[in-house]
Image (spheres, rainbow, N blue to C red):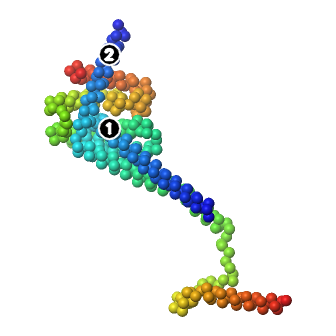
Amino acid sequence: MSACTCQIALSWTREQFTGTTELQREQELNRFLAEVERRALRIAEISVRDRDEALDLVQEAMIKLVRNYADRPDNEWTPLFYRILQNGVRDWHRRQAVRNRVMVWFGRSTGDDDERDLVASAPDPAGRTPDEYLEMQDAMESLELAVAALPRRQKEAFMLRTFEGLDVAGTAASMGCSQGSVKTHYSRAIHSLREILGEHWQ
Amino acid sequence: MNERNDKTAEIEDQSFVTKAKEVFDQSVQALDAETQSRLNRGRHEALAHAATDISHGQWLRWAPATGVAAAAVVAVVVLTGRPPVDELTPPATASDFEILLDQESFEMLEELEFYSWIGLEADLDGDMETNGNVG
């Protein structure tokens, strides 16, 4: 009788403990994703040149991270998250290529020539003069175009190292390659960007 | 000479990277409220979505163990045969149910202890008579 009671009590305690741990984990994940989401969105947006698509890609990456890697140590989340995101971007480009081929076959435009309404989407630049804001926006637009023109691996290495601030090891984990490759891609990316953007950007 | 060139190139690269990071961070800070709201909503949906999957996964994790336990119970029942049935106990019939559902039977059930005692007394009397015959 008492053994049985003990067993039930233990089981209940374990369930309570597991429930608490899961809740803590969910809170940690929420904090991590909240911290990373805006930079991730901008990185995805530079890669696909479309905010709505970038938002979808970031959410998909979030779902996959939480579903498959929630129990991994916190310090692995950043490279894992960006690896998922980069894979998503790659798949998106593949789908786009197929879609474009189909559209060309049917003789239709893909609608990519729609210009973004810069005034409508203009954010409120807190604490900046309009001139400063426009200058920043102009610099970012040039940088985005230049980064978008880089070969895929150079683009990934540059964005992960510079924008997300990952170290060489973290970038290698995200890209699924060696640290030596990361260094090579990163170095080439910087030289190409400096060439493309010219001295006036610096 | 080459060393100095390398150092200069390194400093210029670093300066370029610093500026790129600064411009990028500003563009992140400048994200409009609607986009931030969509990100926030997307994150909560992702967490809720995944939590549902996890709870389903936990249920499924016990499925093999439950299956094995059920199979073990079936195996024990089959191997040990049917549970022993007291041959003296007559099977319940339709008439038994009619009796039980009768109004008087309900009254009897309320005084079940009394009838049980009466029955026990009668059994004891019978036993004494039998033993007396033997002895």
What is the x, y in percent for residue A24?
A: 43, 47
| Residue A53 circle label | none
- Say what amino acid the circle numbered 1 marks: Ala
Q: Is residue B127 left or right of residue B70?
A: right
Q: Would residue A192 be visible to someone looking at this image?
A: no
What is the x, y in percent for residue A176?
A: 43, 33
Residue sitting at x 37%, y 51%: B48
In this figure, which residue is indicated by the disc labeled 1?
A: A40
Q: Would residue B126 be visible to someone looking at this image?
A: yes
| Residue B9 circle label | 2
Helix, strand or loop at mark 1? helix
What is the x, y in percent for residue A91?
A: 35, 40
- Say what amino acid the circle numbered 2 marks: Ala
Residue sitting at x 65%, y 87%: B117
Residue sitting at x 77%, y 89%: B128
Q: Is residue A51 left or right of residue B69?
A: left
Using the image, determine if residue A200 lies above or below residue A177. above
Using the image, determine if residue B35 lies above or below residue B123. above
Helix, strand or loop at mark 2? helix
